[in-house]
Amino acid sequence: MNLEHLPVVHKDGPRNDHDIMIFALSTCGFCKRALAFLDNQGFSYRYLYVDLIPVEEKNKIKQELKDRFKENVAFPFAVIDGSIHLVGFIEADWRLSLGVQP
């Protein structure tokens, strides 16, 4: 998936133990909570607001994610270390996948 030409935002934090890419919507409360969780835990990550890019690009990204992970795309959609994915924001699942203690 080539995201180089899209407005991907890089957030730096003291924790770089995972490669985290979040596909989110700028108006989504769950997406905002997911990004705040990553900030609060000190993770470095990247995110893209897919509702702010051209619809053709959005549809292409959604199809690529669906084909790759065999999962319907809902937001936020997190890709961790290129192989783990999370759909939606359930804090317990994110903690488990990222190795964060409760």
Image (cartoon, rainbow, N blue to C red):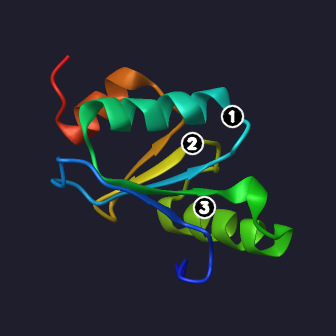
Question: How many other residues sit within 10 Å of disc 3, few (<14), some (14-19) or many (≥20)?
Answer: some
Q: Do the residues labelled 2 and 1 touch (CB within 8 Å)?
A: yes
Mark earlier in primary sequence (2, 3): 3
- Identify the image quadrant of the C terminus: top left
Question: What's the CA distance linking mark 2 and mark 1?
Answer: 8 Å
| Side of 58 where 94 appears, left or right | left
Residue 75 as seen in the image, left or right of residue 97: right
Which residue, given by chain and number where applicable, does mark 1 sit on?
A: 28
Q: What residue sits right under mark 3 in the picture? A: 66
Identify the residue at image location x=76%, y=59%.
52
Vertical relation: 62 (above or below) 96? below
Which residue is at the front of the view, 62 or 32?
32
Mark 3 or mark 1: whose residue is earlier in sequence: 1
Alpha carbons under labels 3 and 1: distance apart: 20 Å
* Residue 62 in the image, given as x and y percentages of width and height: 67, 62
The answer to whether 41 appears left or right of 73 in the picture is left
Measured as percent of width and height from the top left, residue 97 is found at 27, 39
The location of residue 78, given as percent across then percent down, is: 46, 49
- In the structure shown, which secondary structural element does the residue marked by tag 1 occupy? loop
Give the amino acid type for the residue marked by disc 3 in the picture.
Answer: Lys
Regarding mark 3 in the picture, which secondary structure is present there? helix
Residue at 54% x, 58% y: name it: 70
- Three-letter code, disc 2: Pro
Q: Which label lies toward us, 3 or 1? A: 1
Rounded to the nearest angstrom, the CA distance separating label 2 from label 3 is: 14 Å
Q: Earlier in the sequence, mark 2 or mark 1?
A: 1
**What label sits on residue 76 in the rendered view?**
2
Q: Residue 39 bears which disc, if any? A: none
Residue type at mark 1: give it: Cys
Mark 3 vs 1: CB contact within 8 A: no
